[in-house]
Amino acid sequence: MDSRVSTTRLRVRGYHLDGYGHVNNARYLEFLEEGRWGYFDDRPGLARRLMGGELAFVAVNLNIDYRQAAVAGDDLEILTRLSAVGGRSARMNQEIRRVRDAALVSAAALTFVLLDVAANQAVPIEGEIRALLEPLVMEQPLA
């Protein structure tokens, strides 16, 4: 797998399920967030820059395509990549795949901005943070 992609695994538990016996749609938001945390865990230099408290990545748009139901006991992989860095926003793409058959369960695109925490305002993606992000961009699809 390309080093610009992070993989996070989790097992579907009973508390993830809805009344129909499959993962509740809202839980996929949590799974995707877990994947994004894993992405930053895999890139400690980038994470350290953001943990300083001055800047934060803030989600401004999230689109999810639900493809197949996941059920209790399924092992899932959340694949996360940075797909674009613009002047004022960037995009991450994520896929959730079932491990046993590699079936695409869900795909998502997240747009985020860089927030100056003290000013509570989006700022351009430039300088050191841009230099950290640009080498991570992987435009082509994951699969």
Image (cartoon, helix red, strand yellow):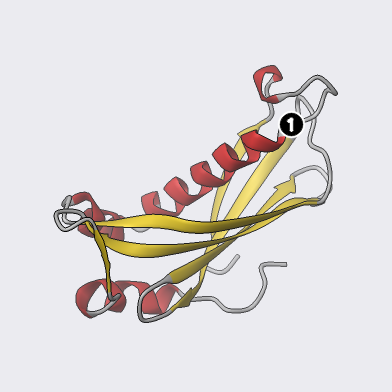
Left or right: 21 in relation to 65 = right
Front residue (pair 41, 129): 129
Rendered view: 13 above or below 75:
above
Q: Residue at x 68, y 22 (%)?
A: 13
In this rendering, does residue 3 appear at all?
Answer: no
Q: Quadrant of the N terminus?
A: bottom right
Rendered view: 1 above or below 31:
below
Q: Quadrant of the C terminus?
A: bottom right
Residue 125, percent across and down?
30, 75
Q: Residue at x 74, y 31 (%)?
A: 23
Front residue (pair 76, 124): 124
Say which residue label 1 marks: 23
Q: Residue at x 17, y 50 (%)?
A: 53
* Type of the residue with mark 1: Val
Left or right: 15 in relation to 40 = right
- Within 10 Å of disc 1 (Cα), the crowding (few <14, some 14-19, many 20+) is many
Residue 20, percent across and down?
85, 23
The kind of secondary structure element at disc 1 is loop
Residue 75, percent across and down?
71, 36
Front residue (pair 19, 132): 19
Left or right: 29 in relation to 68 = left
Give the number of callouts: 1
- Residue 10, by quadrant, is top right
In this rendering, does residue 138 appear at all?
Answer: yes
Residue 137, percent across and down?
47, 76
